[in-house]
Amino acid sequence: MKNELYFFELESFNITELIETLSSTDAVSIPLLREEPRLALLQETKFLRFIPEHGVVGKGENTVVKAFSSFECFSPNSLYLKLVAAFQTMLDKQLAGLPVYPFSSQLYFNSRVLQCYQPGKLGVSPHRDWRSAINLVCIFNIGGMGDFYLCSDRQGTNAVQIATKPGNVIFLRAPGFLSSQNRPFHYVANIRSIRYSFSLRQRISS
């Protein structure tokens, strides 16, 4: 299938600059997907059955409001898995050239989730990823418009918007990055058109 080849043509980036930026800002967004493979990924979403994840989870100060649907049962020939393979290979090669490995363990994405956000909805309120997500979180914007923010707490204090246009990937630090246990607060809001984001995580058993 012709589209499969495009995933081996991801835009390049400087891994040293990426690590330096993450060490001080917690998240950075860069263009990575070229337009033709991005549209092929977007086309595949039409054939997936998303599971609604709407409502409130947690209690008290740990409450999180969610308004999205998700999918993670990808078939072996899914273009999304081909994207993961190409992206993992690219990162492995760049990380191998660094004088000091920036993560507490070998980086490997074993959790892949595609999320769908509807226009006019919140998205997800300020929260932190689970402690089981280590080293690095990567969030691809496959399509649609919405705002991604870093903040200081669950009230959204000191919110800083991170660019997230279609084709970009947000790199978000997680415990294990540069020997830190930092889990940045972040949220998604102002959904203006159906937004599909593809999140990669490295999860460990809790």
Image (cartoon, rainbow, N blue to C red):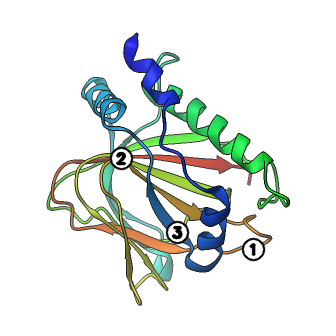
User: Rounded to the nearest whole Å, what is the CA distance between mark 1 and mark 2?
Assistant: 29 Å
Q: Position of residue 93 (x, y in %)?
A: 72, 41
Which residue is located at x 85 percent, y 61 percent? 100
C-beta proximity under 8 Å, tags 3 and 1: no
The residue indicated by pointer 2 is: 167
Q: Residue placed farthest to the top in the image?
A: 1
Q: Is residue 183 visible?
A: no
Tag 1: amino acid: Ser
Q: Residue placed farthest to the right in the image?
A: 99
User: In the figure, is residue 152 to the left or right of 175?
Assistant: left
Neighbour class for label 3 at 10 Å: few (<14), some, many (≥20)? many
The residue indicated by pointer 3 is: 27
User: In the figure, is residue 108 to the left or right of 192?
Assistant: right
Numbered mark located on residue 180 in the image: 1
User: In the figure, is residue 173 to the left or right of 114?
Assistant: right
Q: Position of residue 204 (x, y in %)?
A: 73, 49
Q: Position of residue 110 (x, y in %)?
A: 64, 39
Numbered mark located on residue 18 in the image: none
Query: Nearer the N terminus, badge 2 or badge 3?
Result: 3
Tag 2: amino acid: Gly
Q: Residue placed farthest to the bottom in the image?
A: 158
Q: Nearer the viewer, residue 117 or 103?
A: 103
Q: Position of residue 37 (x, y in %)?
A: 36, 30
